[in-house]
Image (spheres, rainbow, N blue to C red):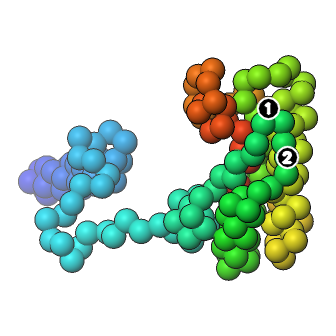
Amino acid sequence: MRHIAIAGIGALALTLGACANKDKAVDTATSDVPATAPTGDADDEVDLVELPGAQADLIANAGSDTVYFATDESLLDGPAKATLAAQARWMLANPTVRASIEGHADERGTREYNLALGERRANAAKQYLMSQGVPESRLTTLSWGKERPVAVGSDESAWAQNRRAVTVVVR
């Protein structure tokens, strides 16, 4: 009888130990093995492709998520319209996607002026997307003014990169 009790305790310990090891294998946050580590068999590896609806998919299929503006302007030029037309085609092909159009300005001007300019730029991009068939219900706008520059510097090159509207996939 004593041997059965010891065997039962041993079996229980092995079961609990196996469960603990299973939990460790699943918890990649505490594992030393990277979550994307190859398995060694090329057929078993996951192909990292862009998922439809993702920001990278928008960029890959529309060419860009950004349009640029002239100084103190919110009018769309030819290249901006072409980019937005491509974005509209992508959005129409992905009908569950929603987007926020974020307007930006360069560092010159007051905070208030640049917030208003960023809003006009975001609205210009939104209106163009809507003219291409994208429902208004899928689009929102936001102005960052000069608060989020992509290029730091006080020269025309930096300013030109910061005068923009960016289409951000928000789902």
Q: Is residue 73 above or below residue 42?
A: above
- Residue 167: give x, y in percent of width and height: 70, 54
Q: Is residue 97 left or right of residue 45?
A: right
Find the distance from the CA under tag 1 to the CA under tag 2.
13 Å
Disc 2 residue type (three-letter):
Ser
Q: Is residue 62 above or below residue 169?
A: below
Q: Secondary structure at mark 1?
A: strand
Eye-nearest disc, 1 or 2 = 2
The residue most toward the left is: 3
The N terminus lies in quadrant: bottom left
- Residue 60: give x, y in percent of width and height: 52, 65
Q: Does the rendering let one see residue 65?
A: yes
Q: Does the rendering let one see residue 142?
A: no
Tell me the quarter of the picture where residue 46 sits: bottom left
Q: Is residue 109 left or right of residue 167?
A: right
- Residue 55: give x, y in percent of width and height: 59, 58
Of 9 and 102, nearer the camera is 102
Q: Secondary structure at mark 2?
A: loop
Q: Residue at x 61, y 24 (%)?
A: 155
Tell me the quarter of the picture where residue 72 sits: top right
Of 137 and 67, nearer the camera is 67
Of 171 and 82, nearer the camera is 82
The answer to whether mark 1 and mark 2 are in CB contact below 8 A is no
- Residue 114: give x, y in percent of width and height: 84, 30
Q: Earlier in the sequence, mark 1 or mark 2?
A: 2
For the residue carrying disc 2, how many other residues have a C-alpha within 10 Å: few (<14), some (14-19), or many (20+)?
A: many
Query: Which residue in the protein does label 2 denote?
Result: 74
Query: Which residue in the protein does label 1 denote?
Result: 145
